[in-house]
Image (spheres, coloured by chain):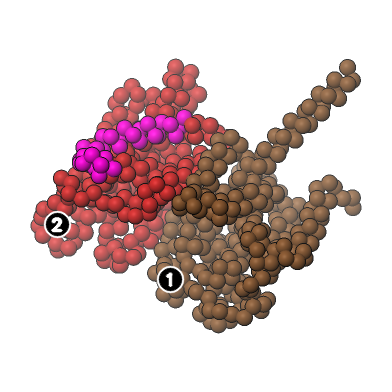
Chain colours: A brown, B red
Amino acid sequence: MSMTKKDKLWYAFIIIAVALPCIPGVIGGSFFGHVATMVLLYASMAQSWNIISGYGGQVSFGHSVFFGIGAYGAGLAVVKFGSLPWFGAPLGMLAAAAVSIIISYPCFRLKGHYFAIATFAIVEIFNRLFMIWDAVGGALGLDYPILPDGWLNFSWSSTKTGYYIGALAIFLLVFGIVRHIEKNRMGYYLLAVREGQETAESLGVNSTVVKLGAMATSAALAALCGAFFAQYNYRVDPPMVMSLDMSMKFVLITILGGLGTFWGPFLGALVLIPLQEYTRAYLSHLGPGVDLIIFGLIIIIVMVKEPRGIMGLLGYISRKLGKTQDSAERGGDR
Amino acid sequence: MSSFLQVLIDGILSGLLYALVAAGLSMIWGVMDVINFAHGEFLMVAMYVCYWLGFILGLDPLFTWIASGIFLFVMGALTYKFVIKHSLGKAAMAPLLATFGLSMLLKNFCMNRFSPNFRLLSGTMLDGKTFEIGGAIVSVPQLVTGIFALVILAALYWLIKKTRLGWAIQATAMDKEAAELMGIDTEKIYLLVFGIGGACVGVAGGLMTTYLAVHPEVGALFSLIAFVVVALGGFGSIPGALAAALLIGLVESFSGFYIAAVVKYVAVFAIYLIVILVRPKGLFGW
């Protein structure tokens, strides 16, 4: 089997990603380490969303519900049951997949903006229910007790290299799964459903099964990211994990990078997250909200100038370069 | 019995307010198939305009809604010219996400300039005025807002159904290319529609300052309710928006009173989901 250029890039990337945390002191407890961890986490979140909304074409604004269920799964296991997040996280993933199927089965009948607004409504319902549900801590949320450091509790206090390795593992898992989907039957079915559901069905694709499968996978992976988020922040509450703002992060990162492309979510996170973290750290003297003003401005500019995101921009640049090369060659022939 | 009447009146009055807030959104959605995600932040800006006019110049929001209406007309038109126009037709969700960016920008700008504090105009003409009907208390500022809502919805309906401009708007909504061939300047229609949509929410925000406090987050809940009202009423239908808004107002008021105050928005969004799953195009949609 010959390696294509794309595959080589992929393996090179894995090697770099694995090597990075081995450089002692670079990640540790530094601000850079925090930013790197967040980039990997948000890239994984965006990629999980990309499965159903990018490849599948069903734009969901409800993913913070699944993210939140995962976060509560890990949080409840630790805070309420004195157990380990390692048991809570997979249960949260299962619960998120089940909830996603129950919600999506009727909602997939809705088209375009109607689907989008239905998913907004679902986020609001879950947010408010979790706010008043005492068994999960209500509006106060769940605060972690002080736990010993290490992989057993998945918690570290001084040097945070463990979180970075955890985020990296999730990143490799999510991107690996999407790579697998993309290269196999499921991916082609998804694209076919996105491009024309009726046509795909007439060719024997069961669009309901394909969409529900993609949604469940997407929700379970989002929940895994949520579980990590709870461990990293040492607390869970509804506005933090289960809000429209959180849902929009899934959407914006992917769209900024490039909807329905493999590298889009990673590129989007690579640009937006450091920008968000560094502006928050360095522009805070200008008063509250300056980071979000800049964030908003960037989103407007991207949507107005290049809605296909960074991948679209890269495509444009490479086409431009290709064209000039072509014309130079043609010029030489003449 | 009087508590039932009270809950009914409260529901109708908040329903009328929602109809007023949703009217502009419905118009833009109906004509351009664009969701203005910054709708709630437009409302907030209108409230700040009237608040500062009242606070600095001592003008009453009973009159300054004209100023906020004009201000928001211009803001809507500028939003179309600089944001929507360039994102239309490029990607499915581009206008929605662009207006989401705008909403972040506006919300955090107001947060930065005016602090997150709640600000309420006191001593206005309608401040705290109430009267009684059959044991139920009616708040005058809310009643005035409700009457304005009916007048403005009627005016919008008249504009769309009975005027040449309205026919041009309908033609543009149905088939943009065909309308252009008939000599309609669709660019101008879009600009006007976005302006009118802004003006509606400008008036709504202005009137709301007579009895509600303004703060940077005030738009969030209202915009969600407006989305639900428009989707429930159906694609750009003004009577649909009114019916849906009244339904939402009554569900909110009755569930808040007879079940529990905390579940009222859960009930609102749940009713929306149930209706939309039975009729995917909304109550008055086609």
Q: Secondary structure at mark 2?
A: strand
Near mark 1 (Cα within 10 A), the count class, few <14, some 14-19 or many ≥20, is some
Decide if residue A114 is on the left or right side of residue A318: left
Which chain contains the residue that carries disc 1?
Answer: A
Residue A31 higher or lower than A88, as above or below? above
In the image, are marks 1 and 2 on the same chain?
no
On the question of residue A108 being in view, the answer is no
Dividing the picture into quadrants, the one containing residue B164 is top left
Residue type pointed to by label 2 = Ile
Decide if residue B274 is on the left or right side of residue A171: left
Decide if residue B40 is on the left or right side of residue A219: left
- Mark sitting on residue B202: none
Residue at 46 percent across and 44 percent down: it is: B105
Q: Quadrant of the C terminus of chain A?
A: top right
Residue type pointed to by label 1 = Leu
Dividing the picture into quadrants, the one containing residue B133 is bottom left
User: How far across and how far down the image is residue A61, in percent?
Assistant: 52, 52
Residue at 19 percent across and 44 percent down: it is: B144
Magenta run includes residue B53: yes
Q: Secondary structure at mark 1?
A: helix
- Mark sitting on residue A140: 1
Q: CA distance from mark 1 to mark 2?
A: 35 Å
Magenta-tinted stretch? B52-81
User: How far across and how far down the image is residue A209, in percent?
Assistant: 62, 57
For label 2, the residue is: B137
Which chain contains the residue that carries disc 2?
Answer: B
Residue at 31 percent across and 47 percent down: it is: B18
User: How far across and how far down the image is residue B59, in percent?
Assistant: 21, 39
User: Marks 1 and 2: which is nearer the front?
Assistant: 1
User: How far across and how far down the image is residue B49, in percent?
Assistant: 31, 40
